[in-house]
Image: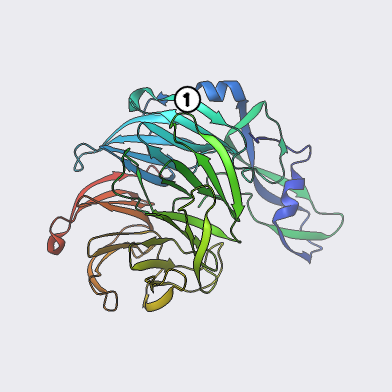
């Protein structure tokens, strides 16, 4: 578990945000913004990883469907539990406090979630009475805050925004500083539909994927494998390097499809502990979640983010030859993010342009069927005639049982 203590001199943190300096003989003080961590004892935080009273959704992250429940990550805070027995009237019933959480996956009654650098297995057989079953240390060693020293006895649970001033009269130089990002600011598949043990359906932006008895998770440059044959007793297995800039993972049958800054990678998991690279498709530098079926892979590319690039489009790839995926056709979009497909309907979250639903029976001739405006649509899960959409202004659900008459069922507003 890696958590962090504050540097002796807060201003040192700002050095990393330096973007440019110019001579100035007039100004003598300069104001900057930074975020100071709030700590709690590790033992206190672990004791509180349980179902607590529900809280409003403020900064939604990853989503997962399991049975009648929606699990929704509150970025770096924990997990909302929503009872979706009636999609037209979902109920926010509990909140599992879990600092440092950004990814989730579910197998049977066990929820897997990251807790900064650790992996937590939580029993959610009764979602209103969730209980920690096991914590596996340091599965995600990259989960740390630059500029803070490790302290295993404390956990960062929140951040306080503060301002400071610098005396710039001597020397006569000033610098433009950006605000140090809080944990919330720093964030950024439909899964197999049938399994012996029910498996949660994740959104396409997920970095967790369940396949058979294993949990696969991607970091920026590697694939980590955890044995979950005994669901409440996850066991760390091996990790393999898979390249640079890995963002998302999507499981389909005996394959894993991974989206990266510069391309899509396909790995075979016939031997689940030793994934083998089968094929890849390279593209310009952008962010690119991916979903796939037996013959096609659908990749959205969007630029203007930390991934770089300026390309915004849907790439349809022919993967009949899994060793040599080829581009079938490209469709221009505004700023596409997450996507999902059910039958011949393709759902794409197109950023500020909202949700777009396409008919995709012919991959060479995908056509827009319906367009729903919303504020920054990010991810979508289409399953059992219900499309669950995560946007920055709310969590939407649409009924698409009648493709010609897709309609809004409900919206959970975001607390700004």
Q: Considering depth in this image, is 264 or 394 the residue closer to the camera? A: 264
> Residue 334: x and y, percent?
39, 71
> Are there few (<14), some (14-19), or many (20+) residues within 10 Å of tag 1?
some
Quadrant location of residue 83? Answer: top left
Question: Which residue corresponds to the image point at 44% horizontal and 31% vertical from the top-left?
Answer: 230
Residue at the spot of label 1: 133
Does any portion of residue 49 appear in the rendered image? no
Q: Observer-nearest residue: 55 or 145? A: 145
Q: Quadrant of the C terminus?
A: top left
* Residue drawn at (81%, 60%) of the image: 173
| Left or right: where 220 falls relative to 15 | left
Look at the numbered disc 1 and give the secondary structure of its residue. Answer: strand
For this view, does 211 lie left or right of residue 144? left
Q: Residue at x 55, y 70 (%)?
A: 285
Give the image location of residue 303, x and y in percent: 50, 68
In the image, farthest residue toward the front: 271
In the image, residue 182 lies at what x, y percent? Answer: 58, 45
Residue 178 in view (yes/no): yes
Q: In which quarter of the view is residue 8 placed?
A: top right
In the picture, measured across the screen, residue 127 lies left or right of residue 405, that is right
């Amino acid at each position: 578990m890696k958590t962090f203590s504050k540097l002796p001199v807060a201003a040192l943190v700002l050095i990393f945000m330096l973007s440019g300096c110019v001579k100035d003989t007039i100004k003598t003080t300069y104001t900057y913004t930074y975020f100071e961590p709030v700590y709690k004892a590790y033992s206190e935080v672990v004791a509180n990883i349980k179902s607590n009273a529900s809280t409003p959704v403020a900064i939604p992250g990853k989503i997962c469907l399991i049975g009648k429940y929606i699990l929704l990550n509150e970025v770096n805070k924990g997990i909302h539990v929503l009872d979706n027995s009636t999609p037209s009237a979902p109920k926010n019933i509990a909140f599992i406090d879990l600092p440092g959480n950004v990814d989730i996956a579910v197998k049977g009654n066990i929820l897997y979630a990251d807790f900064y650098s650790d992996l937590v297995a939580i029993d959610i057989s009764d979602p209103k009475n969730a209980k920690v079953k096991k914590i596996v240390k340091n599965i995600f060693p990259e989960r740390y805050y630059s500029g803070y020293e490790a302290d295993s006895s404390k956990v960062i649970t929140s951040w306080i925004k503060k301002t400071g001033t610098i005396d710039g009269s001597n020397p006569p130089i000033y610098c433009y500083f950006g605000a140090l990002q809080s944990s919330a600011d720093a964030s950024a598949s439909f899964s197999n539909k049938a399994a012996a043990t029910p498996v949660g359906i994740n959104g396409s932006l997920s970095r967790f994927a369940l396949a058979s008895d294993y949990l696969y998770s991607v970091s920026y440059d590697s694939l980590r494998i955890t044995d979950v044959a005994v669901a409440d007793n996850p066991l760390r297995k091996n990790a393999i390097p898979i390249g640079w800039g890995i963002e998302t993972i999507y499981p389909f049958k005996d394959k894993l499809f991974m989206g990266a800054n510069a391309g899509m990678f396909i790995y075979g998991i016939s031997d689940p502990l030793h994934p083998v690279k089968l094929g890849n498709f390279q593209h310009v530098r952008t962010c690119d979640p991916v979903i796939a079926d037996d013959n096609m892979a659908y990749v959205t590319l969007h630029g203007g983010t930390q991934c770089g690039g300026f390309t915004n489009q849907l790439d349809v790839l022919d993967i009949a030859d899994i060793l040599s995926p080829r581009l079938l056709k490209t469709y221009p979009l505004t700023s596409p993010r997450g996507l999902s497909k059910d039958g011949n309907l393709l759902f794409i979250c197109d950023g500020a342009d909202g949700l777009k639903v396409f008919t995709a029976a012919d991959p060479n001739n995908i056509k827009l069927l319906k367009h729903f405006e919303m504020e920054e649509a990010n991810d979508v899960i289409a399953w059992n005639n219900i499309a669950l959409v995560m946007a920055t202004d709310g969590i939407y659900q649409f009924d698409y049982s009648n493709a010609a008459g897709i309609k809004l069922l409900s919206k959970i507003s975001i607390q700004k």
